Amino acid sequence: MHWAFQIANELIEKHKDDQAPITCASGVSPSGYVHVGNFREIATTYFVTQALKNLGAAPRYILSWDDYDRLRKIPKNVNGVAEENIGLPYTKVAPPAGTDTNAVSYGDYFEQLFIDDLAKLNIRPTFIFETKRYEGGAYDEELALVLTKRKEIYDILSRFRTEPANDAERENYYPVSLYCDQCGHDSTTITNYDEATQTLSYECKKCGHAGTQTIGQHQHIKLHWKVDWPMRWRYEKVAFEPGGKDHSSKNGSFDVAKAIAKEIFDWKAPLYQPYDFVNIKGETMKMSSSTGNILTLPDLLSIYTPELVLYLYAKYQPKAQFDLGLDDDVLRNYSEFERLVQKAKTSELDENNQQLLQLTGVDLTQNYPSFNHVVSILSMTANDAAIAKELLLKEATYNTEAIDHILSRASYWIENDATARLVSINQVPNQAVYEQLTEPVKAQIVKFKDLLTTSSTLDENELMQAIYDLTDATDKKEKRMEQKVLFTAIYQLTLNQDHGPRIPLLIKVVGPEKLQQLLDFN
């Protein structure tokens, strides 16, 4: 059974007496371009909700945007944002200058981009925007509760720290960030809390303003992360949520939040699934929006189909780390996925892989050209997508929609990540190579040239068998060696290299007449 279905079954059993939907949550911060490492959280929750649906349950999938967090630093790959904005909430910073957008803020800009990316994967959770929740008063009761129990929260946090508790620190501990009424920054120090009026007094180190904010009167207050997280579990009635390995270690964020949920909010923590990092192949640094060392979903979707992107995330156990590369791994990943799809069409899959394919949303009624096949055509046509499409349509196996689904991605990959795959077709016979061939191979080349006159009457399998039969050896091992020598000679005489695509494809792309000219040494 696939891991997402295992979790879904556990959730169904755990909540079998509940009337409400099973709420599955994930969260992300619009600190910059959301990368494919962040996406693992969203994908993990998405797969569990899809498994719940497949098992007949009614899940509710929420994605919280932590857009009331402060801008901590400006990512290296983000331009047009001034340093003076650091310390403001993401939703109070203007969008990056020079961007073509209708976004109203920095946070809104990056949220819109990622929401659009998710839609391309048919991932459409209910989005929750934390600025609207906080400033709209949704969490007023929770803010008041937390401030009343702030010292109890300090004691809980102290249990998970190596530093000893401090009475003075405990007395002045406030588990909230407060944004200044004057300058909007969070460079504030809270000096007092009046529980009767629910009013906080503060001083701002940035602008010197001293003021008060009262809960329920358009305050600009946000709970610290380790308190905010369990607060939302209760508020949203969260039943499942994943978390990164950095939050999942012993005495880490989840353990702290779990204790606060129980002791402050009287709520049991949700079923929790830790997940490991996704790395860029060949990079030693962890992916980070702030450093700009990232891959984004558009980067992946330029090369991989939506269902293959989902496959790459669903096939690994959440606790397994994996790398994403844009090198020859692309060919391997496509081939692996295509084999799985083919087995599904012939009912050869076990339960785990059947469920895995269900989670990708692949259309098993469609017949797509193999990615490797399309790459082979493009490599010999100077990456000319129009010519490649024309050749693929002539195969009478794929419709236009299926071809377009693969062709644009193969072409993008060759142009941006695999230019070395482009080959040049010789324009004149290569006499120098021909002279170095043995007489038996020369004779086989003549037979091959004659075979080209009737190649259009044979299907691919028949044509390939006819080419195999051009060699004379009867011993299987010797015959394979002769075939290898013949194929190498054909590639050298037509492409000036020792390897190439399957010979039938070479004939199709170059054309029988052109090949006959290149092999004519009379």
Image (cartoon, helix red, strand yellow):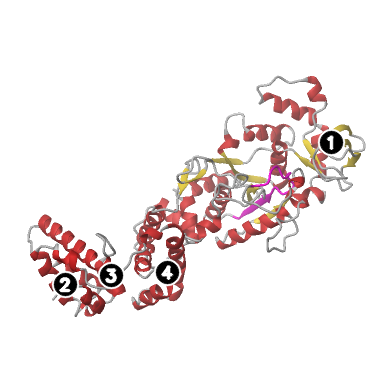
Mark 4, Cα crowd under 10 Å, few <14 / some 14-19 / many 20+, is few
Q: Earlier in the sequence, mark 1 or mark 4?
A: 1
Q: Disc number at residue 384?
A: none
Disc 3, disc 4: CB below 8 Å? no
Q: Which residue is label 2 attached to?
A: 448
Residue 397: image x %, image y %?
35, 74
Disc 4, disc 2: CB below 8 Å? no
Q: Nearer the viewer, residue 119 or 99?
A: 99
Give the residue displayed 51% in from the left and 48% down from the top. Answer: 4
Q: Which residue is label 3 attached to?
A: 426
The amino acid marked with disc number 4 is Thr
**Residue 11 falls left or right of residue 218:** left
Q: Which residue is label 1 attached to?
A: 205
Q: Is residue 14 above or below residue 492?
A: above
Residue 267: image x %, image y %?
70, 38
Disc 4 from disc 2: Cα separation: 38 Å
Q: Earlier in the sequence, mark 3 or mark 1?
A: 1
The amino acid marked with disc number 3 is Asn
Disc 2 from disc 3: Cα separation: 17 Å
**Residue 520 falls left or right of residue 33:** left
Q: Which residue is label 4 attached to?
A: 365
Q: Quadrant of residue 515?
A: bottom left
